Amino acid sequence: MKYGLSIITTIHDWLYSVMPEWLAGLVEMILIALVYLGIFSIAGLFLVLMERRVAAWFQLRVGPNRVGFQGLLQTMADALKLLSKELTGTEKADKFLYNLAPYFVIVTSLMALAVIPFTKEFHAFDINIGILFLIAISSIGVIGILLGGWSSNNKYALIGAMRSGVQTISYELSVGLSLLTMILLTGTLQLSEIIEVQKSGWLIVQGHIPAIIAFMIFMISGTAETNRAPFDMVEAESELGAGFHTEYSGMKFAYFFLAEFINMFIIAAIATTVFFGGWLSPFGITESIPWLGVLWFLIKTLLLVFLMMWFRWTFPRLRVDQLLTLEWKYLLPINLVNIVLMALLVWGNLIIKF
Amino acid sequence: MGPQHPATHGVLRLVLTIDGEIIKKVDPDLGYIHRSIEKMCERDSYQQIVHLTDRMDYLSSNINNEAVCLAVENALQLEVPDRVKVIRTIIGELTRISSHCLWWGVMGMDVGALTTYFYGFRDRELINDIMEETCGARLTMNYNVPGGLMFDIHPNFVSRVKKFVAHFKTKIPEYDRLLTNNVIFQKRTKGVGVLSKEDAISFGASGPVGRASGYSCDVRKYHPYSALDRVTFNEALQTEGDTFARYKVRIQEFWESLSIIEQLIDNIPEGEHRVPTNAVIKLPKGEYYQKVETARGELGVYIISTGTKNPYRLKFRSPGFSNLSLLNHIAVGGKIGDLVATMATLDLVIPDIDR
Amino acid sequence: MTNEALQNNITKWFPDAEAAGLTFSEEESQFLNIDISPNNLIELMSKLKSNEDTSFDYLFCLSGVDWGEELGVVYHLESTLHRHQLVVKVRTPDRENPTLDTVYSIWKTAEFHEREVFDFFGITFTGHPNMKRLFLTDEWQGYPLRKDYEDEINMILK
């Protein structure tokens, strides 16, 4: 359907005809940012509700289903409640850093969201170093956590922040390397190009064995990066209170909380784009309706999000030293061997192509 | 770790001395739920004392009641009918299963697998329903009285218990698949909190804690009471003495309790459910000691009587008390995460310790 | 080992039974009861544990008792090897400042049990590593399980 595209082009032309060029460009950017903020909040609200319903399903109960149809307005109600809470800051906290920390986390999540291709035309920022940009952005998110822990001036928060920082930094390595394995197949870092390559078969099928291994490593390290169970020693409720966001309340706590869910969504979205064909339909059945790509993308991403939630509610927690042993002694060597394997595959032209 | 903490199973305050993540010393601070039960027993009659006992270790309340009733009956040289003995044993084993179900759920929750709590409680609810129908209460049942049982069993009792046994036999493999065979769980619990056999005996560890270190201490085997001398069952023993061994002992106890119930449920003898005693029970002058095996270990009731209607001194030897004393010994040198896992397998119920 | 054999064995350890305050009794109890004077307590206890024929390595109950005029402690012992049981009683007539020796060095479970006895009866155990109150707060006055303990607010008598 060309409607979507034509709406965008009409707005674009109208803006440029009404205002001087620099102003039109600025207004366009602000509009796009607002759209993405909207996506961010709606996605956040929906994911929180999904987590609660999925958790309830595993735990043989029902979960929130009263507020709104099947509980869809539940998170809205929770958000309104959080807004009305008193922002209790501690006296000795470093005011500037204490307030700045949540914004780091939010801003990096938004930036990552901008690069993800929802469908062919719905792609805000299609730069030629797409994957590299994504990995770089997630590294900046660590700063928010460390700042939050330190500026709270609370030793438990600091311990939690330190543990989280170490964990995130270690697992970024695995994330980067497993994505690198797939880049060997595509030959390009640009996200839209990666999806074009997958028109002849999804990358996980093209790369068979090394791609499956890379996918598993990516899911494990992705879960660890976002500090979700079974790697959530950081926020282990049964041990440390609440970890690095102990001292935050109200809206700021909501920021950390939402950012964690959006990060989960981003990891799933990256996995969908790189391994499962992004917005492409299986066997190209709806190729003629480009806007259905959003639907395919969402289905695939939500399936992966469900997988991450499944992990959380089934497995026990790993101890901190076991976490790090897993990364440095097991995942890293497997990753390196996998890259060599994939390189051999590409060189010997053993890829499965349709 | 203050009295309100999700991992201490009750109001227990532990003062930990730590160096980074390593624990140097564990000092329990008790008394938050001390209700001076022993002093109250010196002024209450024996029937009233039975009611006090199930507030101690509320998860094995039936077995606690049985302990005092047996002590009084042995002192009075009162012979209770076979029917009473068999029913007491069946209800005792059901209580043990129910307590272990809750233990399993909480163990998973402490280690991080939050879903196991619900699965453990789902099965415990079935037992609670059976208890409610027969005994009248779900937690503090007070079904045993000196002389027998307070009422006869409900007509549905036998069929419900049989249905439960059949159902639960399919659930234990599910428990195994979820936690026992899970690599993460095994890594968290193997080699953690090791207790040697000599230390177990010296610290007075009993029940699953002692049996996991190879110390054969099942009171049901060595000093059988009620109908336990006519059933055959194995004692769940492991030798490593670490947290995983304590876990496995309790899982095996599930199977053993189910086997005991199966041996008894079909042949409950007919008879009276209660032998009449005097309204005011006076134990003859002397000292009496009765041991029973609760879900936590060996509970001892020590009565010194001077012939009056109240005991001169009544002492409860609670299993949790001795099990807690070895916490300092086995937690030192480990990490805080290990402490949480170890405490979950010691299965402490703080009202049992504080009395 | 039967109670008689135990009694014979233990008598051999104390040539002067009178001075040691060693008496045996079996009436009014299901176990063999031994009374001993406080001075010889440690000697008797360590021999009970280390001797191979008796080898009482499991102390399963340590209770404090207020006998009216004397304060005392009752120890219930069991052997995991021979599976026989024994009761040892020790009394001290001193009610102002009663002291006994600790058996912590013999059975480690005594640590908590003796703290409880100190908390409720006031008996101090010499040699105990941590002689503090266990259940009650450190500032509590009095020893509740003694027969002459009075507390108008907290105690409800019939």
Image: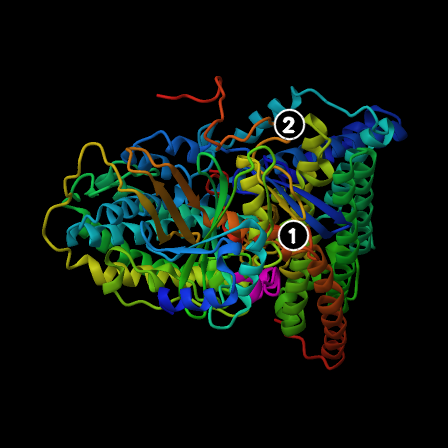
The answer, for residue C74, to whether it is visible in the render is yes
Q: Residues within 10 Å of mark 2 (few under 14, many from 20)?
A: few
Q: Residue furthest bottom?
A: A348
**Taking B209 as reference, is A7 left or right?**
right
Q: Is residue A230 magenta?
A: no
- Return the x and y of residue A261 as percentages of the image width and height: 65, 42
Is the N terminus of chain B in the top left, top right, bottom left or bottom right quadrant? top right
* In-front residue for pair A223/A230: A230
**Which residue carries the number 2 mark?**
C139
Amino acid type, mark 1: Gly
Residue sitting at x 20%, y 57%: B265
Above or below A310: residue C55: below
- Return the x and y of residue B193 as percentages of the image width and height: 61, 59
**Which residue carries the number 1 mark?**
B337
Above or below B309: residue A129: below
- Return the x and y of residue C142 as percentages of the image width and height: 57, 28
Label tally: 2
